[in-house]
Image (tube, grey):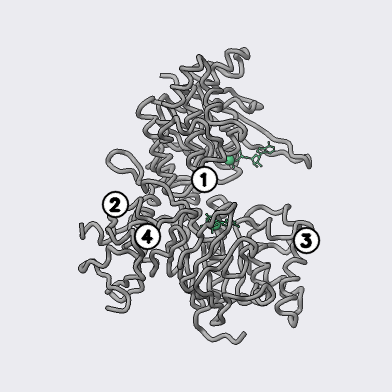
Amino acid sequence: MAVQPGNILEIDALSVTYRVRGKTVRAMNAASLTVRDGEAVGLVGESGSGKSTLARVSLGLIPRKIARIESGRILIAGRDATRFSETEWESLRGDPVAMVFQDPLTYLNPVMRVGPQIAESVRRHTPELPLDQRVEELLELVKLPSVVTRAYPHELSGGMRQRALLAVALGCRPRLLIADEPTTALDVTTQAEILALLKDLRRRLGMAMLLISHDLGIVASACERIYVMYAGHTIEWGGAGAVFQTPAHPYTVGLLRAAHAVRNAEGRFATIAGDPPNLAELPPGCPFVPRCSHALAECSRDMPERFDARSGDPHSVRCWLYEKPGLGFDRAGTG
Amino acid sequence: MEPLLALQNVSKTFRRSGGSVVHAVRGVDLEVGYGETLALVGESGSGKSTLGRIALGLLKPDQGRVMLAGKCLNELPPDELRLARTAMQPIFQDATASLNPRRSARELMAQALRGRPQAIEQRAIALLDSVGLRPGAEYLPRYPHELSGGQRQRLAIARALAVEPKLVIADEPLSGADVSIRGQILNLLIGIKEERGVAYLMITHDISIARAFADRVAVMMQGEIVETGPAKEVLSAPRHSYTKQLVAAVPMLDAPVNAGALEAGD
Ligand SMILES: Nc1ncnc2c1ncn2[C@@H]1O[C@H](COP(=O)(O)OP(=O)(O)O)[C@@H](O)[C@H]1O
Ligand SMILES: Nc1ncnc2c1ncn2[C@@H]1O[C@H](COP(=O)(O)OP(=O)(O)O)[C@@H](O)[C@H]1O
Ligand SMILES: [Mg+2]
Ligand SMILES: [Mg+2]
């Protein structure tokens, strides 16, 4: 595919449902997200907010029997992939878009040594290169010793497995790497090593990354732009500084306060009252309304398209509160 | 005053199937005072869970003594040991694994409560209420799979409290929980401590939680305690190089500057 800088991934008002025991679970609701070439984008939200669905649908990996794209579009490097067949998706996996997951063991072949698995991914995507040399390079890139080529996945530590899976993914030379909770199963020190590796790889390979985590600290430390997801909606996005330091959506504000583990005058930690909504019974309007102390009448009717920061910095929020003048945001298209 | 829990020169070695040995815990001395919250931190594999299991009497140390309220657990006859053990209750990371899936909340609570059936029912409801499963009566017939992750952890906590422990040993009770649930569970533990004066031994790899939640912290590395002291001090200005590394590994978030323009607009 000819590489011209642009949007490697564009999710445009995408809605995805799962049919589960006669119920319709609305996992993504007109969610939008863009990743430009070379850029590190973070996606945060609580578990069940639809992050993994967004990651999987971007690779055509949602289970076709029960999952359905209801509306919206997926563009991969400018091509509309929304209605792609399995064969068409197959041609996009690995190159230009590759993915790593929380549990590498599920995605590595348990009865095959690590070396041949990396070699296979290289062979499929860049057959012209000398194989052994390329495998060596990849191991070096992910900082694994070459003895690992002869190991089986279960013989490796959690951190080494994640590195091995990364080597397999990078074997395809992706323009975009989607990493879905890549460090969640690891302890803090290994987590820090893998994060440092991801940052290093991105810099060296100039590839774009979509880093998904329920851990705000991780995403904040590694990404330039951030999207916040709640109940299948992308509710706020913008530069990492803007979103983390001056959050706009009441949910983002609550989430950041809760993440910032500090006790108040009564000795209590900040929480968000109530529970996340049941995605099989979503009411109309903003899904955060039942937990929101600022909610207005219109919030239960529908969700605004978006309000953009007047400062011109990239920062947008989908919340009716920002219709009020003086809060530094303008309705999209009116500014 | 003697401490509530004292581990004295405790060691534990495991033999792996291949024949190699792991010195999981090496000559550890550790005390938890009445009503105190101690955080035990360290990277995975450093021996925290093994130490926790030894304290709970679930694992016999190769060497050393476990003293609870001045009594040596290793030397107690079985019936006294059982009684002494109820003074300590565990909470684990995975509430699903510690709750029998075939038992309803009513049965799980009754197992822990013991006594006249009617009194049990009332106390079970009160306990469920107190951990935020309200109204408690509505949760009695529910099975673990009918609860959310956060609700299951609350049920596990309610059951641990049913025996009125003096010490709760919590092994990574919040790993995997979302930040909003994390705060709810921590606040629940803080409330319980204020009401009943229980002590906590909180095993965690989350440095920011240890710093904010605990009175004191012990840092474990390769089976040994390498640094202890007031949690805020040790985790804000660590002395030991290993503690420094642990603290530096955690990506820290600054507090959001504004609460959005929201509050200005109120
Ligand atoms: N394969 C699936 N079958 C049925 N429901 C699913 C499936 N995958 C995800 N869901 C549901 O979709 C919603 C979003 O899940 P997911 O995308 O995994 O969120 P996250 O990654 O943010 O935790 C949840 O309610 C989840 O139960
Ligand atoms: N039952 C066991 N058999 C063999 N080795 C064990 C056993 N339990 C723990 N270990 C080993 O002891 C060390 C300490 O483990 P653990 O106490 O679980 O550490 P932590 O809780 O700090 O992650 C590790 O190397 C672990 O592999
Ligand atoms: Mg997920
Ligand atoms: Mg452990």
CB under 8 Å between discs 2 and 3: no
The residue sitting at 51% across, 75% down in the picture is A73
Percent x, y for residue B232?
Answer: 38, 42
Quarter, ligand 1: bottom right
- Visible residue check, residue A284: yes
CB under 8 Å between discs 1 and 2: no
CB under 8 Å between discs 2 and 4: no
Circles 2 and 3 on the same subunit: yes
Percent x, y for residue A271?
Answer: 37, 46
In front: A145, or A231? Answer: A231
Measure how far apart labels 1 and 3 are at the Cα level: 31 Å
Badge 1: residue crowd in 10 Å (few <14, some 14–19, many ≥20): some
Residue that mark 2 sits on: A293
- Visible residue check, residue A220: no
Residue that mark 4 sits on: A286
Q: Chain of mark 2?
A: A
Mark seen at residue B175: 1
Residue that mark 3 sits on: A113
The secondary structure type at the circle numbered 1 is loop
Q: Residue B137 lies in what quarter of the image? A: top left
Give the position of the N terminus of chain A as an image quadrant.
bottom right
Measure how far apart labels 2 and 4 are at the Cα level: 13 Å
Q: Residue B59 lies in what quarter of the image? A: top right
The secondary structure type at the circle numbered 3 is loop
**Amino acid type for the residue under numbered disc 1:** Ser
**Amino acid type for the residue under numbered disc 3:** Arg
Asked whether mark 3 lies closer than 8 Å to ligand 2, one says no
The secondary structure type at the circle numbered 4 is loop
Residue B95 horizontal side relative to residue A331, left or right: right
**Amino acid type for the residue under numbered disc 2:** Ser
Measure how far apart labels 4 and 1 are at the Cα level: 29 Å
Numbered disc in front, either 1 or 3: 1
